[in-house]
Image (cartoon, coloured by chain):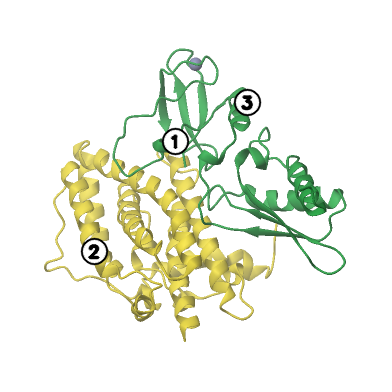
Chain colours: A green, B yellow
Amino acid sequence: MQTNENILTKNIWSLLQEVTDPEVPVLTIIDLGIVRDVKINKAGAENEIEVVITPTYSGCPAMDVIRMNIRMVLLEHGFKNVQITTILSPAWTTDWMSDAGKEKLKAYGIAPPNPKQQVCNTQLFAEDEAVQCPHCNSYNTRRISEFGSTACKSLFQCNDCHEPFDYFKCY
Amino acid sequence: MTKEIIYNYTLHLADNALILAQRNSEWCGHGPILEQDIAITNISLDLIGQARSLYQYAAEGCEGATEDTLAYLRDVRAYKNCLLVEQPNGDWAQTILRQFFFSTYQYFLYQRLQQSADATLAAIAEKSLKEVTYHVRWSSEWVIRLGDGTGESHNRMLNALDELWAFTGELFTPAGYEMEAVKLGIGVDVNEIKGEWEQRVNEIFAEATLPSPTTEGVWMQAGGKTGVHTEHMGFILAEMQSMQRAYPGCEW
Ligand SMILES: [Zn+2]
């Protein structure tokens, strides 16, 4: 049934598509999978819009900017009573990234995350995951460093086209 | 009473993360090679993020406190971090070994803290564990690389072991608030993770051709958890807090 509340919730979800990750601007926060819920809370004359988000990494400096941008976008569309709630559990995983998001990442030159079963464990010198080069599609690549320019990435290089590239690592 | 125990226990976890993050961040721009400079500062960033979550939670239990007042306006005696994390960076070997000892400890601690009766601490542990897993792997690999590397790197690891070993005992010696937190079902009994920690250390040391460390005849230092710190702590805070003390409430 299409209640007013349903329509409003849908509307908010589509507005949130306008908020992008300041560090990887091709990705919206919906692509990233960090928006977990949108709630309409009855609060007197004007309903309160509650957006529930979860951080990618604990120390991700983009989260503060994202919180502000969510508020700005909703304000622009006339929603003044906005509550942004952060939850930590269940912890964010790259499995929540949308397929559209993965495509956009690759087109941007960042290798998208492999599926969840390759999330880091404590096993040493683990065989490098076969990460596909976003430039020439070769799987003949090697990891240069576990840590990259932002918390969510590691550094790779392609053995075929020799281009270095970022890999959005499994989490 | 319960509120005070949660407050102290959470601060202890937060201070450990923040002080090690501050130490590691001293490497920024000074790492041995670019990739490792980025790695150690990324680890700092993860730890600062964990500290923030914990301070925000602690602040809820203390009238007028915020994450910033807890990090920037407390003095040495109020800090509850263990002595290990405040030890100087020394050379790369010493930084690596400190990280390895601490990350391995944090790994087993957070694994158990996920089952805490306190839902917020459990959630922070679940989140942080993913990051700490990377730290364990990275630092373990470096212990092996240096220990089983050249004569020079091997000797530096032995030296680092001499410098740091006496500070590992405190990790498994619970402070009063830790024991109280265990009784309430919110904290982790550090005695329970000691065995796993030792086993992991011995495994990695064997692969690194380093001697298995022993606690026999070693005087283990303690005190940090209850605010009795080494001489280094005051200098760390002087640097970390100087902005907030000179310009109270400043933001950028
Ligand atoms: Zn390529």
What is the number of the mark on residue A108? 3
- Determine crowd level at label 3: few under 14, some 14-19, many 20+ residues with C-alpha closer than 10 A: some
Q: Which residue is mark 1?
A: B35
Quarter assignment of residue B208: top left
Q: Mark 2 and mark 3: span between their CA atoms?
A: 46 Å
- Determine crowd level at label 2: few under 14, some 14-19, many 20+ residues with C-alpha closer than 10 A: some
- Determine crowd level at label 1: few under 14, some 14-19, many 20+ residues with C-alpha closer than 10 A: some
The chain letter for the residue carrying disc 3 is: A
Residue at the extreme left: B216
* Disc 2 residue type (three-letter): Lys
> In the image, what residue occupies the spot 43% across and 18% down?
A139
Nearest-to-viewer mark from 3 and 1:
3
> In the image, what residue occupies the spot 40% across and 77% down?
B227
- Quick one: label 1 or label 2, which is nearer the N terminus? 1
Quarter assignment of residue B88: bottom left
* Tag 2 secondary structure: helix
- Left or right: residue B121 versus residue B167 is right
Q: Which residue is mark 2?
A: B194
Q: Residue A66: image x %, image y %?
A: 69, 48
Residue A150's place in the image compared with B91, above or below, is above
- Left or right: residue B241 versus residue B191 is right
Residue A31's place in the image compared with B179, above or below, is above
